[in-house]
Image (spheres, grey):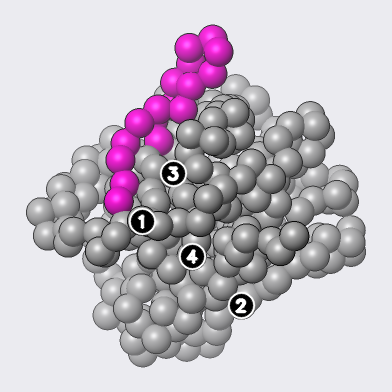
Amino acid sequence: MAIDPELLSFLGGPRTSDMDDVAGSRARGQILTSEALLHRLSPPLGVSFHDGFAENLRGDRVPVRIYRRDNLPARSGALLFIHGGGFVFGDLELEHDRCLHYVTHADIVLVAVDYRLAPEHPYPAGLDDANLTLKWMVQNAEELGIDAQRICVSGASAGGALAAGLVLLSRDEHGPSIAAQMLMYPVLDDRGTTLSMQTFEIYDPWDGDRSRKMWPLYLGHHGDAVAYAAPARATDLSGLPVTFVMSCEEDPLRDEDFAFTQRLLDAGVSVEFHHYRGTYHAFDAFAPESTVGQRALSEQVLFLTRAVGTVPTQ
């Protein structure tokens, strides 16, 4: 295996995801975020976003960022997006550029959720926040200008675990109808026994060592994972919506993504699977302008367009 030459220059930066020093890693990440904000370009012409809150009848509130493009069709499809960060890092800035890209190129309204992070808020806090946001989107579909029957739930890395867990939870509790799920190199299995987890034990930008240390921080006092926390533990994957799964060749999560995809297919779920050779974890976020990064983002947009972005014919 060899990394795509275009991606090599993006490796070797400051380590901002040290599970042995969460506070220090967050501080370093905030410095990088502040520097990035100083150089942030304006949104593409015709695209806007604003911060607000999703709220339930009890008054519980979750920070969200809502993105939209001008002149969208009435009752557009929608995307609930959940950022990554090992369950303990990240905020609405982490995947801001990705969200802008989706809204620029697909006819959707996007709601990004700023869920509570572990270890201060272990499972199920983050999942509860995502679930509240999904229900709020459905209840406020008219105000948001979306079709409540055309919502895709998506997440990258640990956000993929939250997205897949939310889809399972919504199915089991007869919650809001979810039209599709889009999972980019998702975290799925807390057991850490795959070959890729061992092969990439120490590796940047993500490795098996950090993966194993991440899970106790997320699970907290719950100890053993349940399917809504670690979707690979689900015994029944039937009845799930059309699913997009993306994996990376040199990624400790690669094999659990392979296995989950195969189990979805075995359960009769319609799956679109993309595996990118010569890539590392989250390459499309680290190197979105690379050839393979652009291809990956384009394929995500195409899936969104086919799944929820195109107004269905009557």
Q: Please provide percent x and percent y for residue 120.
A: 42, 25
**Mark 1 vs mark 4: in front:** 1
Q: Secondary structure at mark 4?
A: loop
Choose between 309 and 222: the one closer to the eye: 309
Which residue position is annotated with label 4?
A: 106
Q: What residue is at 55 percent from the left and 84 percent from the top?
A: 277
Sort mark 1 into few (<14), some (14-19) or many (20+) by Cα contacts within 10 Å. few
Q: Which residues are magenta?
A: 48-64
Q: What residue is at 76 percent from the left and 54 percent from the top?
A: 241
Which residue position is annotated with label 1?
A: 70
Comes first in the chain, label 1 or label 4: 1
Q: What residue is at 39 percent from the left and 51 percent from the top?
A: 68
123 horizontally vs 165: left or right: left
Q: Is residue 90 above or below residue 246?
A: above
Choose between 93 and 208: the one closer to the eye: 93
Please, what is the three-letter code of the amino acid marked with disc 4? Ala
Choose between 73 and 166: the one closer to the eye: 73
What distance separates the C-alpha of mark 1 from that of mark 3? 18 Å
Find residue 127 and name its label: none
Q: Please provide percent x and percent y for residue 226.
A: 73, 35
Residues under numbered marks 4 and 2 in contact, where contact means CB atoms less than 8 Å apart: no
What distance separates the C-alpha of mark 4 from that of mark 2? 22 Å
What distance separates the C-alpha of mark 1 from that of mark 4? 12 Å
Comes first in the chain, label 1 or label 3: 1
Please, what is the three-letter code of the amino acid marked with disc 3? Ala
Q: Please provide percent x and percent y for residue 42.
A: 18, 59
